[in-house]
Image (cartoon, grey):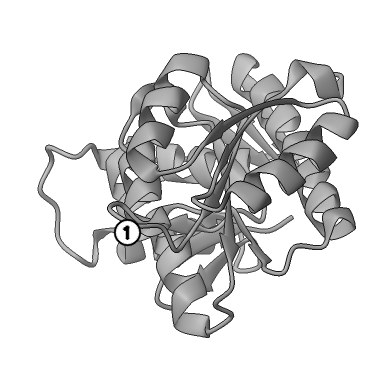
Amino acid sequence: MNNSDYKILLVDDEPDILEFVSYNLKKEGYEVYTADNGREAIERALDIKPHLIILDVMMPEMDGMETCTELKKIPALASSIIIFLTARSEDYSQLAGFEAGADDYVSKPIKPSLLLSRVKALLRRYSGAAAQEQSDTLQVGAITIDKERYVVIREDQEVVLPKKEFELLSLLAQKPNKVFSREEIFAKVWGNNVVVGDRTIDVHVRKLREKIGMDHIKTVKGVGYKFEI
């Protein structure tokens, strides 16, 4: 995909930031839309289905964390990537952002070169994930996930997994290095209407590690899990 094929929604309550960031994104060829608050952001996102959302954390009425949480509940926006803009560099702020479903952080004051490199890298990942989702086979490093047969192939050996373990592995492996919060994993693997114990994910992860190796699924303390190649 060319840059012009990507739609980016920029959300910030500061007009100067909207103008500055929009200018730099448009200069790279991206199709840019803006909103100045969280509620408008949700409405615009539903309308345009952006590939990537750049979201300010500190906003009145509905802040970035709450907006991100609401966006992640919408199935049509499940694949939208979210980058937070924040002047707060404390660890707790980042952890809260990842729990809400953020994919990355960029600190204010914004350096255009850094922001653009993050955007480019995340959109490359989006393209790769989209291509993988359309295929019945997902290849991540030395592991092949055959979605049609519900089989994992590792070191030329077939590993048959129970349905939920397979779905958990497929979710994490679709976006290597992305941190999936426990809430997001519950919603996408078990569904919001299913009541399961707090340790359910941990047990499934432990079993997966026993079957595919200890090096792939990493724990991000206080947030969730990610898959590393």
**Residue nearest the observer in this picture, 40 or 75:** 40
**Residue nearest the observer in this picture, 59 or 196:** 59
Mark 1 residue type: Ile
Residue name at image x 70 percent, y 42 percent: 19
Percent position of residue 23, x then y:
80, 38
Asked if residue 169 is positioned above or below residue 43 in the image, the reply reads below
Percent position of residue 66, x then y:
32, 53
Q: Residue furthest front?
A: 15
Mark 1, secondary structure of its residue: helix
**Residue nearest the observer in this picture, 192 or 5:** 5
Which residue, given by chain and number where applicable, does mark 1 sit on?
201
Q: Residue furthest bottom?
A: 90
Q: Quadrant of residue 151?
A: top right
Say left or right for 203 vs 44: left
Percent position of residue 212, x then y:
59, 55
Asked if residue 31 is positioned above or below residue 17 in the image, the reply reads above
Asked if residue 82 is positioned above or below residue 219 in the image, the reply reads above
Quadrant housing the C terminus: bottom right
Residue name at image x 43 percent, y 45 percent: 168
Q: In this orientation, does residue 141 appear?
A: no
